[in-house]
Image (cartoon, rainbow, N blue to C red):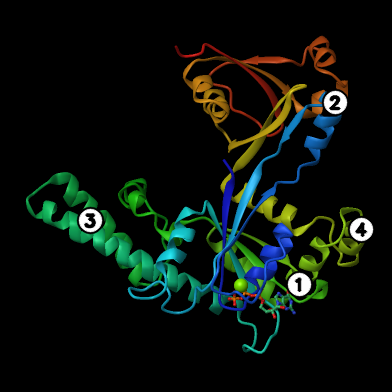
Amino acid sequence: MSLRCGLIGRPQCGKTTVFNAVTAAHASMFDAAEAHRATVAIPDQRVQKLVDLYSPAKISPSTMDVVDIPGLEEGATTEGGRGSKLLTHIKEADVLIHVVRCFENGHGSVDAIHDAELVDLELMAADSQTLTRKLERISKRARTGDKFAIQETENCQRVLDRLHDGIPARRQGLTDAERASVFECTLMSLKPVLYVANVAGPEDMNSDAVKALRTYGADEGSEMVSICGRDEADISELPEEDRAEFLSELGLHELSVERLIHAAYSELGLVDFFTAGDTEVHVWTCCRGSKAPIAAGKIHTDMESGFIRMEVIAYDDLIEHGSEEAVAKAGKLRLEGKEYEIRDGDIVVIRFSPSR
Ligand SMILES: Nc1nc2c(ncn2[C@@H]2O[C@H](COP(=O)(O)OP(=O)(O)OP(=O)(O)O)[C@@H](O)[C@H]2O)c(=O)[nH]1
Ligand SMILES: [Mg+2]
């Protein structure tokens, strides 16, 4: 399952430009009403090393679906706004990549925080409608004295009140009970956010606007990356062998897609592990701290339900010793049980009893 990223932001903040920089999809900036969508392989240098070792017939990297969601202007999400398609895209996303304009253009001066807050207002307006509908539904049951409905009503009402005070749900410090009560509403202002400061050039990578946005993000525990959208979109069109040189001219070591992915993984607490052999090298993604059966379930549900044990080699050990046999000889092939927490870079073989 791909990591689903939704690009949001004020009109003309550079969403489509960043989309092109990240996906090399060459989307037109002029069909502003259309959502653009692309799937990109998540770059991971370890995969190439594994491919060199195993010479697999097939390579399956982790992938990321990126959607450039247009039109989050004022009023877009309110009843009658042209918002329902837009909202579906946002609701489907695992993480919202919020692009904030940190370059000057004809649309007024740079005010990163103000712009970010305006986008949040739209998300909150939609969330407020969703919560109000839920409250209408359950308050009838609450009036009959249904204890569960009374509790749900109180929880949802508290979240709604704070939305009306202008606090996005992800900044509300929700209790577990509140979180559970609003779960089915898929609140947009509760989605994890990764901020992208879209700057004009490398000299602006640490501008005042960028610093302000970083602090704003840090207040809610969100990551921020700066991207020279326009330059990096140009670079993504170059042949692969030429990219590094132009990137280093911008003072960058990694493509924007790599920087974004690192930030998204850290924000969402994700890790990658591998299955590797001569048929396939496959990258799997799961939450940091997942127990072995849950991780195995990413590969196949039978592997979770019938989990027996996991044979694990750490990526660094494999590279150091050069083969699975050599790792085993060095005593570094581990047998792990149900309580093992998967680590980033584990190369695993699952032993399980298949269901009948
Ligand atoms: N200087 C500079 N201009 C940029 C940058 N990124 C985008 N632009 C310009 O800003 C304008 C808008 O860029 P888009 O990528 O179309 O912005 P958008 O958010 O997709 O716009 P809408 O879809 O219409 O809301 C274009 O003229 C871009 O060339 C950047 O990093 N630096
Ligand atoms: Mg656009």
Real-space Cα separation, disc 2 to disc 4, in angstroms: 27 Å
User: Quadrant of the image for the C terminus?
Assistant: top left
Q: Amino acid at mark 1?
A: Arg
Mark 2 is on which residue type? Leu
Q: Are marks 2 and 4 in contact (CB under 8 Å)?
A: no
**Which residue is located at x 49 percent, y 76 percent?**
118
Q: Residue at x 36, y 49 (%)?
A: 183
Element type at mark 1: helix
Q: Is residue 207 left or right of residue 77?
A: right
The N terminus sits in image quarter = top right
Q: Which mark is residue 298?
A: none
Q: Is residue 262 left or right of residue 70?
A: right
Q: Residues within 10 Å of mark 4 (few under 14, many from 20)?
A: few
For badge 4, the amino acid type reads Asp
Callout 2: SS: helix
> What number is the disc on residue 242?
4
Mark 3 or mark 4, whichever is nearer to me:
4
Instruction: Identify residue type, mark 3.
Output: Glu
Label 1 near ligand 1 (CB < 8 Å): yes
Badge 1: residue crowd in 10 Å (few <14, some 14–19, many ≥20): some
> In the drawing, what numbered circle is on residue 230?
1
- Could you tell me which residue is drawn at 82 percent across and 71 percent down? 202
Observer-side mark, 3 or 2, equals: 2
Label whose residue precedes the other's in the sequence (4 or 1): 1
